[in-house]
Image (spheres, rainbow, N blue to C red):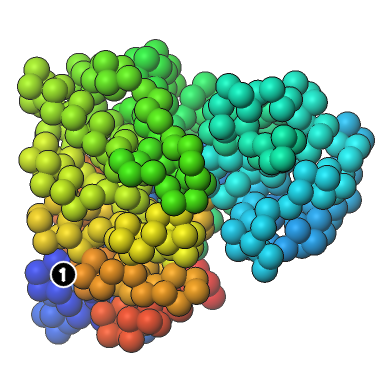
Amino acid sequence: MRVLYCGRILTIAEPLYAESMLVEDGYIVDVGNRNELSKRYPDADLVEFSGVMMPAFIDAHSHFSMNAGYMAQCDVRGAKSLAEVVCRVRAYIDKKHIMPGEWIVANNYDHTVFDDVEPPKLSEIDAICPNNPLVLRHRSAHMIVANYAALNIGAVTEADADSSPNFEIKDGKLTGCLKEGAAQRVTKYIPPQSVNQLFDAVTETCRFYTSRGITTVQDGGIGQRSLDLYKLINGVGELDVDIVAYISGSANYAPLKECFDSFNRMENFSVGGIKAFLDGSPQLRTAWVRKPYLTEDTCYRQSVSDDKLINAFCTAAKHNTQILVHCNGDAAIEQFLRCLEVAEKDHPILKELKPVIIHAQLMGRDQLPKAKELGAVVSFFVAHCYHWGDVHLENLGEERGMRISPVGSAIELGVDYTFHQDAPVILPDMLETVWCAVNRITRNGVKLAEDERISVLDALKGVTVNAARQYSCEKLKGTVEKGKYADLVLLDKDPLVVDPMDIRSIKVKKTYRRGICVYSAE
C-alpha cells in the first residue's frame, strides 16, 4: 500500500523540512516537494496532517522488562507526602486483595519531592502495613526502604551498618533505608512475578512507549527471568516496538545470547550486547566521585576492579558486540576511560563497537576529550537537571551541581552523545528530556550552567539520529530520508518553532512503526 503524507515534515536531515513523503511496505520511498510527489505517485492514498511529522524517538537506555514488572506492582510515583504513599499502598492492598503476610512492593518512591523533604521514620513506614513485608523501591532503583517485617526476613540488624554504610542507621537505629547491594539482603526474598504476570503487562508497556512517540526501546541489563519472558513473547508474534536487549554481566553474555538465538524468531527483537555497572546514583550519594559529597562523610568507593572491567571490555571485543557501562560519578567515568584505553590497545575493534557511558551525570569536561579519542558514546540522563538538580546542588555544591550533564561541552568537543530516561526511573518522555537539555532548569527554578544548554535541534538529534548511530542502525532509523523505516511520530506542534519553555507541553498525536499506526491520541 502506498501512502503519500502531506504536511510539515521535520526530517532531522538535509534539507531540514519537507512537504511530503511516500511510505510503502514500511519504508520511506521518497521525500520532497508536495506537487512533485503528487505527480510522481498519483495512485498513492493521500493523507494530509496538521502538526509536524518527524522521525520516531529512539530510547538510548531503559529497562523494558523492568517496566513490565512495575506495571503489575504498586506505583507511588509523584507522591508528595508519606500520607499519599500510605493511601496508594492501602488502595493497592484493597484492589489486589492482598492477604496478611504477602509481600508488597511499591515503586517510584522519592522522599526528595515530598513537601516535607525529611525521609519518613521507620516506625512511620512500618505503620503502613505492619502485617505485610513492605518494600518502597526508590525511583533511582538504587535504594529501597523496608519495614520491620521485611528487614526481619532479610535478617538485617544494626550490626550490618558496621560492614557497609549502605545499611543506613540514625542514632544507632536502622532507618529501613538500604542502598545499592545492601538492598539485596531483603529483595532476594520477594517472590518473583510469574512470567504470565509480566506477559500481561507487556502490551501496556509497549503503549507506555508508543504513546510518547518511541518505537525503538532498550531492555538494559536482562537475565534469566527476562529470557523466559521473551520466550513467551516470541510465541505470539511482533510487538509494537523494536527491542534491543543488553545482557547483564560479561560472564553471562555468551550462554544467554546462545539461548536467545535458539528461540528468537522476532524481527523486532535483538541482543545488542553487554551491560555492566560501576557505581550508583548521585541523588543518593552512591555515585563514585573524585571529590567527596558535601553532605556525607563517607563516599562510595570502587566496586569493580580494573582487571574485571578490562576483562568485560575484552569479552565484548571477542564477541564483536557493544558494551554499555553504568557510570554516574566522575571517578567511575575515570575508571571506564582508563580501562577502555588499556583494552583498546589489544582490541582496537572496541572503538568501532561504540562502548557507551550510561548516565554520565557528573562527567568532567576534562574527561570528554578522552571519551572522543576512544570512540565512546556518552548517553546523558539530562532530565536529572529538572528532577534532581536541586538535590545535586545540595550534595555537590554549586561548582559541580551546576555542571551536571555537560552536554554543551560534549557537542563543542565533538563527542558522540544521546539522551535517555532510564525508565522506569522516570517516564520515557523524550520531549521533556529535550526541554531539560535546552533549558536546564531545576524543579525549584534554578538555572543550571548556561554554557551547557544546547539548541533544540541538537537536543532532538540526541533522541533520533544520534541514538540510531549508537545502535549502529543509522541507515534505517533516526531521520526522514529515502530508504529508511517509516518509524514516525506526529506532534501537535513543531519543537523548533514553539517557545523553548513550551517544548514539554507538546503532545504526541500519532506514532507509526514501519508505516503502521501503533498509537493514536484520537
Relative depth, front residue between 231 and 440: 440
The residue that appears at 85% across and 52% down in the rendered structure is 90
The residue labelled by disc 1 is 31
Relative depth, front residue between 294 and 176: 294
The residue that appears at 24% across and 59% down in the rendered structure is 407
Direction from residue 466 to residue 36 in the image, left or right:
left
The residue that appears at 42% across and 47% down in the rendered structure is 293
Residue 50: percent from left, percent from top? 36, 84
Occupied quadrant, residue 512: bottom left
Residue 232: percent from left, percent from top? 56, 29
Relative depth, front residue between 342 and 53: 342
Q: Against 513, is 138 above or below?
A: above
- Amino acid type, label 1: Val
Look at the numbered disc 1 and give the secondary structure of its residue.
strand
The residue that appears at 31% across and 41% down in the rendered structure is 290
Relative depth, front residue between 78 and 127: 127
Residue 231: percent from left, percent from top? 52, 26
Q: Residues within 10 Å of mark 1 (few under 14, many from 20)?
A: many
Direction from residue 292 to residue 394 in the image, left or right:
right
Work out which quarter of the rendered image holds the N terminus and state it.
Answer: bottom left
Occupied quadrant, residue 123: top right
Can residue 331 be seen here? yes
